[in-house]
Image (cartoon, rainbow, N blue to C red):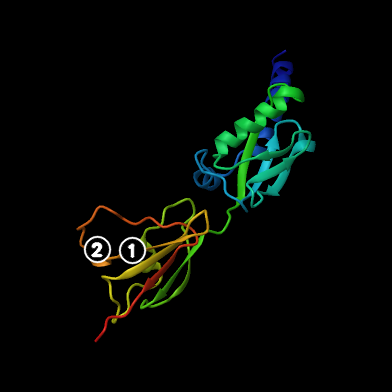
Amino acid sequence: MARTANYWLILVILPLVGWGAQSSPSAGEREAVSGDYVLKPQDLIRIQIFQEPDLNRELRISQESSVALPLIGTMELKDKTVRQAEELIRKLYDADFLVNPQVNITVVEYAPRTMEVFGAVTNPGVIVFPREEQLTLTGAISRAGSFSRLANKKAVTLKRTLPDGKIQTWIVNVDELTKGETNNTWPLQPGDVVTVPERIL
């Protein structure tokens, strides 16, 4: 009798273990793909529906922040976190197709987020944002090898293209930033261009 009970217990546990192994990201992935991560165009995501393998997809979010899924068609993910996207997909499938579906989203590949630093720095060029982290003006300059000997730290230019296509420009005194004389850390956005001029000798 005890052997029979153990046999049925194994049959119940094995499917649950298999689902966990299939859908749960590794410890590193769980850290990288938090539910609060905001999905972005060109992110490559894996969408898994528990016990519905025909509906599983691995696809890249379009430039318009949309994806196309079986049965529910094209859906908008603009400004949605991973958790919000999972809930949205769950509701859409639950409405007409599945009963209380379980949805899991994993970010397989992050969209590249870059900006540029030019001028009087050691290694001018393209700077990649840290994954899921903010990048500040001083952080970007540091990633570009820091200021060269002739850099004018008091007149660093930051240019940003706004959603309407206009370019906004700021002149920043980085000396004040490094000395802690201002509370503005100047967080950067993808596409920003920073130029460090040389001092006039």
Q: Residues within 10 Å of mark 1 (few under 14, many from 20)?
A: some
Q: In the rendered image, which quarter contains the N terminus?
A: top right
Which kind of residue does numbered mark 2 sit on? Thr
Q: Measuring from the top left, give residue 183's x and y in whole percent.
A: 25, 52
Q: What is the x, y in percent for residue 131?
A: 49, 54
The label on residue 178 is 2
Binning the other alpha carbons within 10 Å of mark 2 as few (below 14), some (14 to 19) or many (20 upward) gives: few
In this view, the residue farthest toward the top is: 1
Which residue does the image show at 42% across and 64% down from the upper left?
A: 159
- Amino acid at the residue labelled 1: Thr
Q: Circle 2 sits in a helix, a strand or a loop, which is it?
A: helix
- Confirm or deny contact between disc 1 and disc 2 (CB under 8 A): yes
Residue 10 shows in the view: no
Residue highlighted by disc 1: 138
Q: Position of residue 149 (x, y in %)?
A: 28, 81
Please provide percent x and percent y for residue 197. 34, 77
Q: Is residue 30 left or right of residue 52?
A: left
Residue 163 left/right relative to 51:
left
* 153 to 2, vertically: above or below: below
Instruction: Name the residue located 63 percent from the left edge and 31 percent from the top edge.
Output: 88
Q: CA distance from mark 1 to mark 2?
A: 8 Å
The front one of 151 and 3 is 151
